[in-house]
Amino acid sequence: MRLEDFDNDEDKIIEDRLKQKSWNEIRTNDSWAIFKIMAEFVNGYETMGRIGPCVTIFGSARTKPDEPYYRLAEDIAFKIGEAGYGVITGGGPGIMEAGNKGAHMSKSPSVGLNIVLPFEQHFNPYIDTDKNLNFDYFFVRKVIFVKYSQGFVVMPGGFGTMDELFEALTLIQTKKIAKFPIILVGSTFWSGLVDWIKTVLIETEKTVSPDDLNLIKIVDTAEEVVLVLENFYKKYNLKPNF
């Protein structure tokens, strides 16, 4: 394929990189990457081990501060913080910024697990300075999310949010992590997805058990989020960490 046949600059960059590296070079780079991966795990474990488990808020990086879901995420994080929970987000703008802002206002731990991306992502100013972690690898970051989260609040978002939601669902469904609450905020936004799971995955294809839907709670207010968390903690005789 000729370079002029590519549609955009990104395709040209990929083509150039493929031309520049031999298979042996790629294998060597992969081997050395193991040490960088290990360093990210060690730094994540050591930092989060000092903070302790928190409640994670997922959501879109594209949500603007004047939009309703941003304000709702901020309110949720504030009330979560007042209830004694720390807050973890992906560390970036949008819903993540709102989550860290609400936690910061409540003076609860405000944690950011930032991922290095070529667009969108940059850490927000509401993360505690000693709780701002940066990752190059999505899979390392996701391990830290699930290892140190005692609840997942999922706001409206895109592919990344869906990836994080289904990662948490899969790990709980397969009993790889404890059965922490997964709270979907925004019944209007999430109802279509939940209906599809019911009608296609459960009823038609039978690829999901009906009981798996019990892992999800759908709410619309900050008060409902806190109530779900508190009911879960009372049921299992747990307490917030802060």
Image (tube, helix red, strand yellow):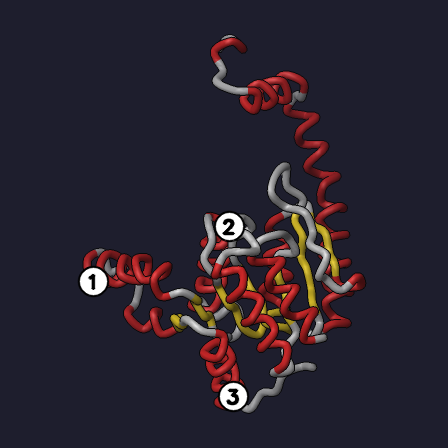
Q: CA distance from mark 2 to mark 3?
A: 30 Å
Q: Position of residue 23 (x, y in %)?
A: 64, 24
Reading the chain from its start, which is encountered first: label 1 or label 3? 1
Is residue 179 at least partly visible in the picture? no
Residue sitting at the far front: 66
Q: Which residue is mark 1?
A: 203
Q: Amino acid at mark 2?
A: Gly
Q: Which residue is mark 2?
A: 160
Reading the chain from its start, which is encountered first: label 2 or label 1? 2
Report the front residue among 45 and 158: 158
Q: Residue at x 57, y 55 (%)?
A: 65
Please indicate whether residue 32 sits to the left or right of residue 204 in the image.
right
Q: Amino acid at mark 1?
A: Glu
User: Where's the C terminus, which quadrant?
Assistant: bottom right
- Where residue 48 sits, quadrant-wise, is bottom right
Is residue 175 at least partly visible in the picture? yes
Q: Amino acid at mark 3?
A: Tyr
Report the front residue among 152 and 222: 222
Q: Residue at x 72, y 57 (%)?
A: 125
Residue sitting at the far right: 130
Reading the chain from its start, which is encountered first: label 2 or label 3? 2
What's the mark number on residue 89? none
Asked if residue 1 is positioned above or below residue 127 in the image, the reply reads above
Structural crowding at the residue carrying mark 3, measured as other residues with C-alpha within 10 Å and reported as few (<14), some (14–19) or many (≥20): few
Q: Residue at x 54, y 73 (%)?
A: 151
Q: Which residue is mark 3?
A: 236
Q: Position of residue 91 (x, y in %)?
A: 65, 56
- Where residue 66 sits, quadrant-wise, is bottom right
Q: Position of residue 144 (x, y in %)?
A: 64, 61
Q: CA distance from mark 1 to mark 3?
A: 31 Å
For mark 1, give the secondary structure: helix
